[in-house]
Every structure is written in structure tokens, then in C-alpha cells.
Amino acid sequence: VPMPPGYLEDLAAKFASDDNMQGLQEVLCPVAKELARRAKSCSALGDFSVPLSTVRRLVSIEPIAKALVELKEFLPPLKEVTGRGIESPGSSWLGPCFCPSIIDDPLVKGQPNVGDQCFAGADGRRQGDFQQAFR
């Protein structure tokens, strides 16, 4: 459901004018977590532009950007989360936004599955077909 023009800007300005950034963080925390969940479930063939454009829209508003990076979910304890763990939902709200990939990854259950869509019937193909595809 589209929001009225200027709604986010007015919301951010209201919290900023009341010097209530904690309240803005409380409003944004569930939004950030949902964006992370949706981004994690996208593949390169899916519509990953929706969660990513929403993140872009949110961080383009300065008070919202400040509130988002102050969330404890923005930067997890780096001693506990290493490597690809940053992409896991729950570790960071921004990490899953880096996850859409064309590589078929058992850790990422993106839909639609790139392997199933692009390499359907691979078991029945000859080795020469694969070699020719990579030239």
C-alpha cells in the first residue's frame, strides 16, 4: 500500500522535533526486521528491488537514517558474527540486503530458485552441452 507523499518525512520530522529518536527507533525496528526477512527470501530472479528500494527510500531521510544505524540490529557483535553470518536474519537488518545472488546457495532459500529456473533438466543433458555453454 503506497504511503501519502511526504508521510515518512513528516513522521521523521515529528520525532526529531520532539527530540524522541528512541521513539522513532521503536517504530523503525520492526520495519527493518521485516525488510531483512523479505530481502533474504529473494533471489536474483525474484523481485528483490522492492525491499532494496524501500531501504534506499528510508535511508534517504536523514532522521530515519540516523535512527536505523543506531539500532542494535544494525551492527551485530562482530566477534559473534563473521563472514556470511552477516546475511542471516537476526544478525543485522542490513545484511540480508546483500544476499540476492545468481549462485544457487543452500544457505539462501531465495525464490524463484535460479538453479531450477536456469538449469532445469541438467541431469539429462550431455557433458558436451555444458562445455559448449561455457565457451
Image (spheres, rainbow, N blue to C red):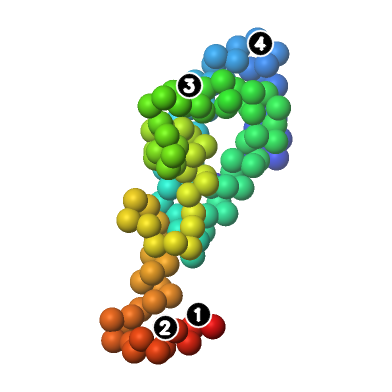
Q: Which residue is mark 4?
A: 18
Q: Are marks 4 and 1 in contact (CB under 8 Å)?
A: no
Across and down, in percent, residue 100 comes to 49, 54
Residue at image point 37% right, 52% down: 108
Asked if residue 109 shows in the view, the reply is no
Label 4: few (<14), some or many (≥20) within 10 Å? few
Residue depth check, mark 3 versus mark 1: number of the one nearer the observer:
1
Which mark sits nearer the N-terminus, 2 or 3?
3
Tell me the quarter of the picture where residue 87 sits.
top left
Q: Residue 8's x, y, as percent?
A: 65, 32
Which residue lies under the disc numbered 2?
Answer: 130
Disc 1 is placed on an element classified as loop
The residues bearing labels 2 and 1 have C-alpha atoms spaced at a distance of 7 Å
| Residue type at numbered disc 4 | Asp
Of circles 2 and 4, the one toward us is 2
Mark 4 in CB contact with mark 3 (< 8 angstroms): no
Q: Is residue 102 above or below residue 121?
A: above
**Which residue is label 1 attached to?**
134
Residue that badge 3 annotates: 72
